[in-house]
Image (cartoon, grey):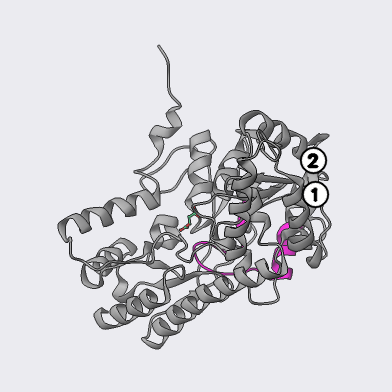
Amino acid sequence: MFTINENYLKLPGSYLFSNIAKKVNAYTAANPDADIIRLGIGDVTRPLAPSVIRALHEAVDEMGDAATFHGYGPEQGYDFLKEKIVAYDFAPRGVKLDLDEIFISDGAKSDCGNIGDILGLDNVVAVCDPVYPVYVDTNAMAGRAGGYGADERWDKLIYMPCTAQNHFIPDLPAGKAPDLIYLCFPNNPTGSMISFEGLKKWVDYANEHGSLILYDSAYVAFISEDVPHSIYEIEGAKRCAIEFRSFSKTAGFTGTRCAYTVVPKELKCGEVSLNALWLRRQTTKFNGVPYIVQKGAAAIYSEQGQKEIRETVAYYMNNAKVIREGLAAAGFAVSGGVNAPYIWMKTPDGMTSWEFFDALLQKAQVVGTPGSGFGPSGEGYFRLTAFGTYENTVRAIERIKKVF
Ligand code: MLT
């Protein structure tokens, strides 16, 4: 008889955002007239940029003509997109990458999970706490997280608390060094951002201890201060880090799907190149992102394309300002929202994160994300996203101020 991957049975409940969607659906079913404002999952609301739409249409037409039709593409992505990525996302920051160090994919979420395929199951994993749940759940599925205890912690994971005391930036681990370290900056969920000096400490630490940093930079487009945009701006990072990037939030591709992962050729485990392993994995398990979608993504890399996506980012960051300043003026403790589209607020009156979620939904019909869903240190916090419409964002803050 066949067996299953029993690690799945250890997972608590469902994926955080599915759980929230279920709760909101139940509320809507019971209150069909409720005017719900969703500032929960970080899903974008602005349409794709006109340059992207134009490129998508052109690519569709190409697919309808035998002379320009495209079948299977390179699993790791077309050079026309990788060349633009190198030229626009890295060269201006002083980072030199070869095209074969970039792997186009359908999402940073999938890549953050799939990367585990090329890494040993005995690696000790460190995650920030709170953290984007994908890093934890995918390691639990692979068996690297151990068992899930009554204290709502996985017993083999190292949790690195990110609290108001450390400005939501993790401290270097004190004990035995972890093998795999997940870092996400600009941070999801706290909206914090790391400095050059802070990131250098991590890179030096990883190189000294032979650790691998899995650096999620999906929110890089929202940076407004003088901070690292890529981990490769730090000397030595190519020897110890993989970086994940995404078009989801940068260019509104949450429903269109395109991302990329950088695996430098300098990155080795002993003599083994991680770039070669990832190439082997991708060519075997993945057939690449559709030509049409890659054409759409490439369109953001022009003067006009950049102007258009920057306008959209500015729109969301204005929402972030509305949330941050509105809540702060009303006496809430808030952080984030300066280099990231997420605002991290302390729940009022000592409420737990889920108590606040329920109260907010019932009294204000506003949906956010409970901090405890991102990890034990998120308890007593709540995340709001700036990805709503401006009008809804203003209305949501007015409602929150009125009710609490
Ligand atoms: C979030 O809300 O944390 C993100 O939208 C989830 C994701 O990007 O997968």
The location of residue 383, given as percent across then percent down, is 42, 66
Q: Does the magenta stretch include residue 188?
A: yes
Identified at 61% across, 47% down, the residue is: 61
Foreground of the two, 75 or 246: 75
Name the residue that disc number 2 marks: 268
Q: Looking at the image, is 329 positioned above or below residue 103?
A: below
Query: What amino acid is labelled 1 in the image?
Result: Arg
Quick check: can you spot residue 145?
no
Foreground of the two, 399 or 129: 399
Q: Does the magenta stretch include residue 208?
A: no
Identified at 60% across, 68% down, the residue is: 309
Residue segment shown in magenta:
181-203
Q: Looking at the image, is 191 positioned above or below residue 2?
A: below
Q: Are marks 1 and 2 in contact (CB under 8 Å)?
A: yes
Name the residue that disc number 1 marks: 239
Quick check: can you spot residue 229?
yes
